[in-house]
Image (cartoon, grey):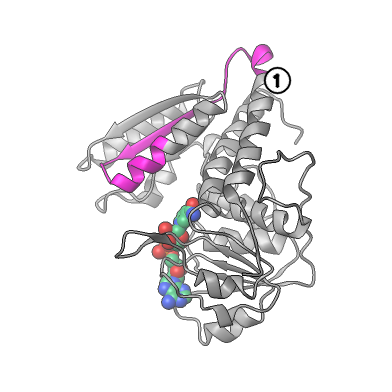
Amino acid sequence: MTAQLLNGKWLAKQIHNQVKEEVEEYQPSVGRAPGLAVILVGDNPASKAYVANKEKTAKKCGFNTFDITLPRNSSTEQVKEAILSFNSNPLIDGILLQLPLPEHLDSNALINLIDPLVDADGLHPANQGLLMRGEGHLRPCTPLGAMKLIDLAVSGIDSSGDNDLDQEIPEADLRGKNAIVIGRSILVGKPMGMLLLERNATVVMAHSKTADLAARAREADIVVAAVGVPGLVKGDWIKKGAIVIDVGINRIPDGRLVGDVVFEDAAARASHITPVPGGVGPMTVAMLIYNTLQGYKRRHGLDNN
Ligand code: NAD
């Protein structure tokens, strides 16, 4: 392996520390900690584990957490009520509706009910529209976390050790760079493309109908794979020195979690690569916490924007 590993666990920990410090700074004047509310519908084991992890991290950062767990067969009306009750609760600065929802529920219609000011996942159309215009505060967590990992790669800061970060990671300017995003979901692929454009990259948005994906990937200085197909992105698709961000999380038959990229082969050519697990996953949680802090700061006039 020649690539440097982009250690999402390490970077997420640095962000948790920064958020915790800000909470300690603001709490005395505000009179309360930030509040994260989580709605879980059903008992999907992966979703339960994600939600537990998000709440645990929020508490570690000094947040209050609120949760509503609804049975799998809940009606739209019940989920709607949960969302509306959190919207009107002045102690809540971020609402997370854990996806995927059971099939009989319309995720988009329910996301649309979340107050955009406390939309911690950044998936409300108002926040996605603002992202499209290069504005707004709340960006979808997974692409935002992936972007921070790209910043880490470009900064050259080493994330392999135990040292704490003692400097700001600058926002990378990707002018002149070609990026490919494989996958076009509203959760990951599309907003990822917008974030890369915002940083001046030239972006190819690829998907299941893209012809000759390998050739397109080979032109990319930055490859973001967000598909959900284990091993889709082969090592020889990776240009030498490229940054590879593997968003995919796939459970394979032997029980292991793997990404969408053939890790060892890609790592032999890339300059930087994210592991799975331990890359984008922890950053998604860190960005949820970060977004909730933005909601809190905004509510209390503590943001500079
Ligand atoms: P999705 O199913 O909504 O979208 C998948 C996208 O991949 C689609 O746009 C589709 O066009 C594209 N696609 C499918 N097959 C393809 C192929 N053969 N070639 C090229 N493109 C193809 O999935 P999603 O919600 O965007 O998630 C994608 C992956 O990322 C999943 O593995 C998911 O588990 C993972 N994920 C990880 C995190 C994290 O925190 N690490 C967060 C969200 C999603």
Placement of the N terminus among the 4 image quadrants: bottom right
In which quadrant of the rendered image does the C terminus lie?
A: top right
Give coordinates of residue 99: x percent, y percent: 38, 48
Q: Position of residue 130 (x, y in %)?
A: 63, 50
Residue at image position (71%, 73%) is 241
Q: Quadrant of residue 51?
A: top left
* Above/below status of 115 relative to 1: above
Residue 46 left/right relative to 118? left
Residue at image mark 1? 25
Q: Residues within 10 Å of mark 1 (few under 14, many from 20)?
A: few
Residue 46 is inside the magenta segment = yes
Label 1 beta carbon less than 8 Å to ligand 1:
no
Residue at 49%, 68% (x, y): give it: 183
Estimate the x, y position of residue 65 in percent, counting from the top left: 45, 25
Give coordinates of residue 87: x percent, y percent. 46, 29
Relative to 276, residue 16 above or below: above
**Lateral position of residue 42 relative to residue 126, left or right:** left
Question: Is residue 69 shown above or below 5?
Answer: above
> Could one spot residue 126 in this view of the protein?
no
Q: Amino acid at mark 1?
A: Glu
Q: Which residues are magenta?
A: 26-52
Please give the name of the residue rendered at 33% of the width and 40% of the height, measured from the top-left corner.
48
**Quarter of the image where ligand 1 sits:** bottom left
Judge whether residue 107 can be spotted in this image: yes
Q: Quadrant of residue 300?
A: top right
56 inside magenta stretch: no
